[in-house]
Image (tube, rainbow, N blue to C red):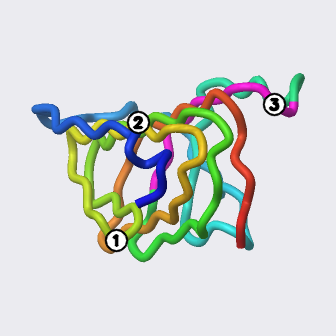
Amino acid sequence: MHASEALDKVLKLQLGQVSLPDDLAFVPYQPGLRENVLIHPLFDNTRDDPAGSDAALIRYLPGAFTPRHLHIGFEMVFVLDGDYIENDISYGPGSLIVRAPGTTHEMRSVNGCTFLATRDVPVKQLT
């Protein structure tokens, strides 16, 4: 465990069935780097400021994978459905994960999942 991981927080919240609107458009997210990952941006301040914040609904198709990266700032992930796996730890619906600056992780999903993700600063890719 890295020192920054001691500052991470994980809460298991009770969550009922989540239904997203049918008209949400998900598009491929960083093709060639992230495999089988789709995104629906909610806001993206990085367009005006490379160090800006962003938030999105992210959908992992079955077998999705995101390689290891470093968080310069805080990240919050709220799992809405499916199996979201970070560093080989599986999180189900209702999991709220807050990662501290300095955290590194890779993510994947076996069966697919959808989650809300926010970052106050973009990440640095490690692989």
Q: Is residue 63 above or below residue 55?
A: below
SS at badge 1: loop
Quarter occupied by residue 48: top right
Q: Are marks 2 and 3 in contact (CB under 8 Å)?
A: no
Residue 38 is tagged as none
Say left or right for 97 vs 52.
left
Say left or right for 57 vs 101.
left
Q: Residues within 10 Å of mark 2 (few under 14, many from 20)?
A: many
| Residue sitting nearer the eye, 94 or 63 | 94
Residue lying at the far front of the rendered structure: 3
Q: Earlier in the sequence, mark 2 or mark 3?
A: 3
Identify which residue is drawn at 39% across, 31% down: 21
SS at badge 2: strand
**Quarter of the figure with the C terminus:** bottom right
* Residue 85 colored in magenta in the image: no
Identify which residue is drawn at 47% across, 49% down: 3
Q: Label 2, label 3: how many angstroms apart (C-alpha)?
A: 19 Å
Kind of residue indicated by mark 1: Asp
SS at badge 3: loop
Q: Can you identify the residue that label 1 sits on?
A: 88
* Residue 58 colored in magenta in the image: yes
Residue 20 in the image: x percent, y percent?
A: 35, 34
Kind of residue indicated by mark 3: Ala
Quarter occupied by residue 31: bottom right
Residue 98 is tagged as 2
Identify which residue is drawn at 77% across, 26% down: 52
- Region rendered in magenta: 50-59
Kind of residue indicated by mark 2: Val
Q: Can you identify the residue that label 3 sits on?
A: 51
